[in-house]
Image (tube, helix red, strand yellow):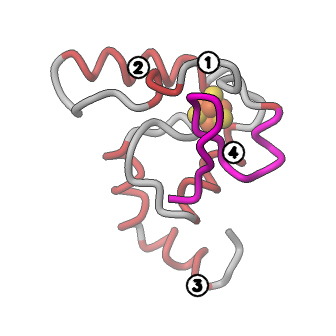
Amino acid sequence: MALQYCENNFFPEKNWYELAACKNLPIDIFFPIGRTGPALKEIQRAKSICQECPVVRECLDYAISTNQESGVWGCTSEDERKNMRRSPHLRYLKSSQAI
Ligand code: SF4
């Protein structure tokens, strides 16, 4: 995982993170435990923060390009990114190095 541990939070090694809506929030919000039941509400809570984030596209690109399997990134859940990785369109973009 391409993350740095710093003062109780994990930070991607990217400049865009300086503008992130989650920059000063507890990282736990974006890493709900589980994918069903109460976790669904937590996932939606994290996504509501992402919806206000100015770097949502950069975050999602980073998550896809570095295969972030856990947590909410770029307003997507683990399952949503898994489905995206299976997408023929995404595989094409990756193979053409557009992302
Ligand atoms: S899109 Fe969400 S997870 Fe990504 S930087 Fe913004 S608030 Fe954080």
| Mark 1 to mark 3 CA distance (whole Å) | 35 Å
Task: Look at mark 4 in the image and give the residue it sits on.
Answer: 57
Task: Look at mark 3 in the image and give the residue it sits on.
Answer: 95
Q: Residue furthest bottom?
A: 95
Q: Is residue 56 left or right of residue 79?
A: right
Which type of secondary structure does the marked residue at label 1 adopt?
loop
The residue range painted magenta reads 1-18
Q: Whereabouts is ligand 1, in terms of quadrant?
A: top right
Task: Look at mark 1 in the image and give the residue it sits on.
Answer: 25
| Mark 2 to mark 3 CA distance (whole Å) | 31 Å
The amino acid sitting under disc 3 is: Ser
Who's the residue at 59% across and 43% down the image?
5
Ranked by sequence position, the earlier of labels 2 and 3 is 2
Q: Is residue 98 left or right of residue 3?
A: right
Indicate the position of residue 46 as horizontal and vertical percent values: 48, 22
Which type of secondary structure does the marked residue at label 4 adopt?
helix
Which type of secondary structure does the marked residue at label 2 adopt?
helix
Task: Look at mark 2 in the image and give the residue it sits on.
Answer: 44
| Magenta run includes residue 17 | yes
Mark 1 nearby-residue class (10 Å; few <14, some 14–19, many ≥20):
few
Mark 3 nearby-residue class (10 Å; few <14, some 14–19, many ≥20):
few
Which type of secondary structure does the marked residue at label 3 adopt?
helix
Of residues 94 and 11, which is closer to you in this image? 11
Q: Residue furthest front?
A: 7
Indicate the position of residue 61 as horizontal and vertical percent values: 64, 55
Ranked by sequence position, the earlier of labels 4 and 3 is 4
| Mark 4 to mark 3 CA distance (whole Å) | 19 Å
Q: Which mark is residue 81?
A: none
Mark 4 nearby-residue class (10 Å; few <14, some 14–19, many ≥20):
some
Of residues 17 and 88, which is closer to you in this image? 17
| Mark 2 to mark 4 CA distance (whole Å) | 18 Å
Ranked by sequence position, the earlier of labels 1 and 2 is 1
